[in-house]
Image (spheres, rainbow, N blue to C red):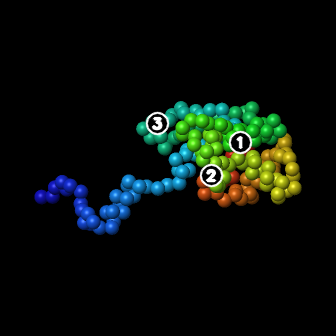
Amino acid sequence: QLTPPRKPEVWFPENHMWVKLDNFLVTNFYSPDYDQYTQMSFFWGIEGLDTTGFDIYDPDDFKGTVTFDSAFDLSTADAQQALLDTCEKLRTEPCNLEGCKSGGMGTLMLHAGNVTSACFLEDFRAWLQAERGISEIPTGSRFLEELTVFRDEADPPPNELVDVDYRRDIGIID
């Protein structure tokens, strides 16, 4: 009659290189500093989330329905400047807590050799200048027209720390 094992299987002798490697990886796992930081995403134009019908026992089945803010309009110069100011503030916000070492920069956001943040509106502004020769972000209906072209055609700068996909990240609601 079969019985469950009483102790774990021993596949290799204790002095085998695989056992030593396994022990080494368990106790000395090395990872870059940025793995210790949290990636954050910010959303604009969302008023709330209707979770009516949400099942806590099956959260993947239905996550809720987004309620959009009807007053949100990024096509105005004031709204664009507020978003650009937020991007800048996130990069420069001081932090003197122990967890905010950030390479000695004393800021909330990690500063590493690579770019550690992405701001689609900054990228949009740079793309307008480089591809269209436009120095200011357009407003009104022209803003949406140009943003749609940017979203569909622009390639984000390569970066191993920040996953940018304009088609995924820039939502346009009719």
Please, what is the three-letter code of the amino acid marked with disc 1?
A: Cys
Residue 151 position within the rendered picture, expressed as x and y whole percent measured from the top left: 73, 53
Dot 1 surroundings within 10 Å: few (below 14), some, or many (20 or more)?
Answer: some
Q: Nearer the viewer, mark 3 or mark 1?
A: 1
Answer with mark 3 or mark 1, whichever residue precedes in sequence.
Answer: 3
Residue at coordinates 49% horizontally, 55% vertically from top-left? 31
Q: Are marks 3 and 1 in contact (CB under 8 Å)?
A: no
| Furthest-left residue in this view | 1
Answer with mark 2 or mark 3, whichever residue precedes in sequence.
Answer: 3
Q: Are marks 2 and 3 in contact (CB under 8 Å)?
A: no
Tell me which corner region of the image, top left, top right, bottom left or bottom right, holds residue 76.
Answer: top right
Please, what is the three-letter code of the amino acid marked with disc 3?
A: Asp
Residue 112, label in figure: 2
Note whether residue 122 is visible: yes
Dot 3 surroundings within 10 Å: few (below 14), some, or many (20 or more)?
Answer: few
| Furthest-front residue in this view | 104
Please, what is the three-letter code of the amino acid marked with disc 2?
A: Ala
Give the vertical position of 48 relative to 30 (above or below).
above
Q: Nearer the viewer, mark 2 or mark 3?
A: 2
Residue 144 position within the rendered picture, expressed as x and y whole percent measured from the top left: 79, 46
Gap in Å between the C-alphas at discs 2 and 3?
41 Å
Gap in Å between the C-alphas at discs 1 and 2?
17 Å
Residue 55, label in figure: 3
Residue 87, label in figure: 1
The image quadrant where one finds the N terminus is bottom left
Residue 154 position within the rendered picture, expressed as x and y whole percent measured from the top left: 74, 57
Q: Nearer the viewer, residue 69 or 82?
A: 82
Tell me which corner region of the image, top left, top right, bottom left or bottom right, holds residue 79.
Answer: top right
Answer with mark 1 or mark 2, whichever residue precedes in sequence.
Answer: 1
